[in-house]
Image (cartoon, grey):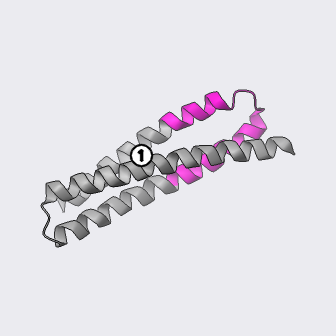
């Protein structure tokens, strides 16, 4: 049980840190947008980033539970789950950032 809680917390912290870095990168990337246009992109990014954070953390939690039932050690299971879902979360957060900028660009064109 302790491994599941630790994996959930570590994966969540990693994806939150990546989300914050991408958020500041988006703020720099959307420098020329008006506030009303950029707000839509930031809202979309915030919602998708929150979904990615929760899904990746829960996915890591379930994978560590699955691997420990398959007789892997808790340390090995934790390392596999954390690394796999952190990498997947980083990629998903980058896609969310691109979607946020895309929404801001779409709103800007109208």
Q: Quadrant of residue 16?
A: top left
Provide residue 6's location: percent of width, then percent of height: 24, 52
Q: Residues within 10 Å of mark 1 (few under 14, many from 20)?
A: many
- In the visual, does 85 lie left or right of 25? left
Region rendered in magenta: 21-50
Q: 71 left or right of 84?
A: left
Q: Main secondary structure of the magenta part?
A: helix
Residue at x-position 41% and y-position 57%: 56
Residue bearing the label numbered 1: 15
Residue drawn 13% across and 69% down? 71
Instruction: Farthest residue to the right: give it.
Output: 110
**Quadrant in which residue 81 is drawn:** bottom left
Farthest bottom residue in view = 69
Residue 88 lies, in percent from the top left, at 42, 52
Q: Quadrant of the N terminus?
A: bottom left
Name which residue lies at 59% across and 43% down.
97
Q: Is residue 28 above or below residue 109?
A: above
The location of residue 60, given as percent across then percent down, is: 32, 59
Give the left or right position of residue 42, taking residue 37 as reference.
left
**Callout 1: SS:** helix
Q: Is residue 24 magenta?
A: yes
Give the residue drawn at x 79%, y 45%. 107
Which quadrant would the C terminus be assigned to in this image? top right
Residue 40 visible in rendering: no
Q: Examine the rendering and report whether any part of residue 82 can be seen.
A: yes
């Amino acid at each position: 049980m302790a491994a599941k809680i630790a994996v959930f917390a570590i994966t969540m912290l990693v994806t939150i840190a990546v989300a914050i870095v991408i958020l500041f990168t988006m703020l720099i990337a959307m420098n020329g947008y008006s506030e009303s246009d950029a707000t839509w992109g930031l809202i979309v990014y915030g919602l998708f980033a929150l979904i990615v954070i929760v899904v990746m953390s829960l996915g890591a939690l379930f994978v560590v539970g699955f691997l420990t039932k398959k007789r892997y050690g808790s340390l090995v299971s934790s390392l596999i789950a954390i690394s796999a879902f952190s990498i997947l979360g980083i990629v998903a957060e980058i896609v969310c950032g691109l979607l946020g900028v895309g929404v801001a660009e779409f709103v800007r064109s109208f």
